[in-house]
Image (tube, grey):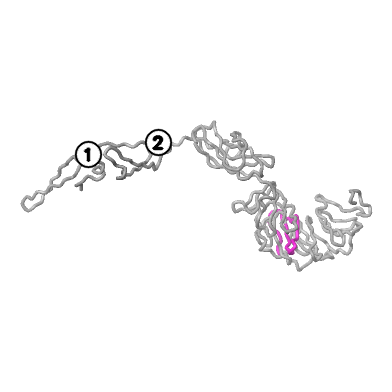
Amino acid sequence: MNSDGSLDTTFDPGTGFNQHYYGIKDVVLQSDGKIVVGGDFTTYNGTSQNYITRLNTDGSLDTSFNSGTGANGYVYATAIDSNGKILIGGTFSSYNGTSRNSVARLNSDGTLDTTFDPGSGVGGGSQKVGDIAIQSSGRILIAGSFNSYNGHTQPSLVGINTDGSFDTTFDPCIGWVSGTIYTYEIFSASLKSDDSIILGGNDFENYNGEVLTDSIAHISADGVTNDDNFFPIVTVNISAPTSVTSTSATGNGVVVNTAGENVTRTIQWDPNQYGFYNYSCSAGSGSTGSYSCAITGLSDGVTYGLRARVNNSYDTVHSDAISFVAQTPTATAPTISSTAPTSSSVTSTSATITANITDTGGEDPDRLIQYGIRHFKRNVHRYLRCGHRWDRGLFLQSYRPNSWNDLLRPSGSD
């Protein structure tokens, strides 16, 4: 097209491509104006061209581009490096009869560049390379639906050195959940001027452990960090319910991020654990921090699923679910310890005694200090000598203290 959107009649593709199901997937311009095209096709203007070809500026087939039998599968991505060589990615397993699993580099004349060796290429998932980007350092980034590259476990996004080897200095982590790899697909990897990367894809919800919004992320040039402020994000967590009885409880949530806009905060519960949540309570609108609302209408002994939910104009999100049982806790006997009054607090008419409740038994106990006059029984040993034998007699003597100090330690006691 011309710059005003009208058709450029000087560009004549003739009958064009025999587009199959996926059609044209990628187009890239060389510095000389020639056009590299990848996709799902096997001819161009009646000439056999398998999934990759190059056109002249007037739309005619560039016959100097010698791809031979070309790729044996779809080419989804193309890129030109600083040396004019062409990177291609897709779902093919060979190029012009030579094994190349989903990624290859071509010389400027279309022949395979054998100095670029990806080894076994990508593996797992759909074994698909959907986009290619080249950083200023020469590092090649491939993105798509896969779990590994040349035997190195790395889902969806990989850095490759200029010789095709795995770049260990590029360290992203996408799709790791509880030790299992899920193949989330990255459709697009675009570079900013500082070589940082904007990713777009399908169903990847976190990058390197950080929650994302709508499968889009801005990451550092080395793949290590995610820019938390690049796209708005809303997140919420659930805490254990409190004040649980057989019929009610208090639901507790924590708003972590709001994307700068207040959220409507709710708690949801249902006896259908981790399924549909038909019951909810609202804590109104608010920002980050803890919130609570009353859970009612519970049935004794029933286990409920529980989660927190928030929404604003950016997103509607909910926490992971937890479970709890509606039942009134059984109270047990409380335990208590006490200490003797200090000498400084004791007078002839008063004293201060300190007690410590070590266990409430599940409910708040009444607290009081008891005191009174106490009689101590003293064991007094009397020894009588009868002949050559000592006999021991025992009698009890009541003792009434004359003061608090006597009560603490009766004088003359054993």
Residue 298 % position (x, y): 53, 32
| Residue 295 in picture, x, y percent from top left | 55, 34
Badge 1 marks a residue whose secondary structure is loop
Per the rendered image, the range of residues in magenta is 119-142
The residue tagged with tag 2: helix, strand or loop?
loop
User: Horizontal placement of 289 versus 24: left or right?
Assistant: left
Looking at the picture, tell me which residue is in the foreground, 198 or 274: 198
Residue lying at the far bottom of the rendered structure:
115
The amino acid sitting under disc 2 is Pro
Instruction: Residue 296: name its quadrant.
Output: top right
124 magenta-colored: yes
Q: Nearer the viewer, mark 1 or mark 2?
A: 1
Q: Is residue 94 magenta?
A: no
Residue most toward the right? Answer: 10
Residues packed near mark 1 inside 10 Å, few (<14), some (14 to 19) or many (20 plus):
few
Q: Residue 6 location, x and y as percent?
A: 91, 48
The residue to which callout 1 is attached is 375
Foreground residue among 108 and 234: 234
> Residue 414, labelled with which disc?
none
Label 2, on which residue? Answer: 365
Q: Quick check: can you spot residue 323?
A: yes
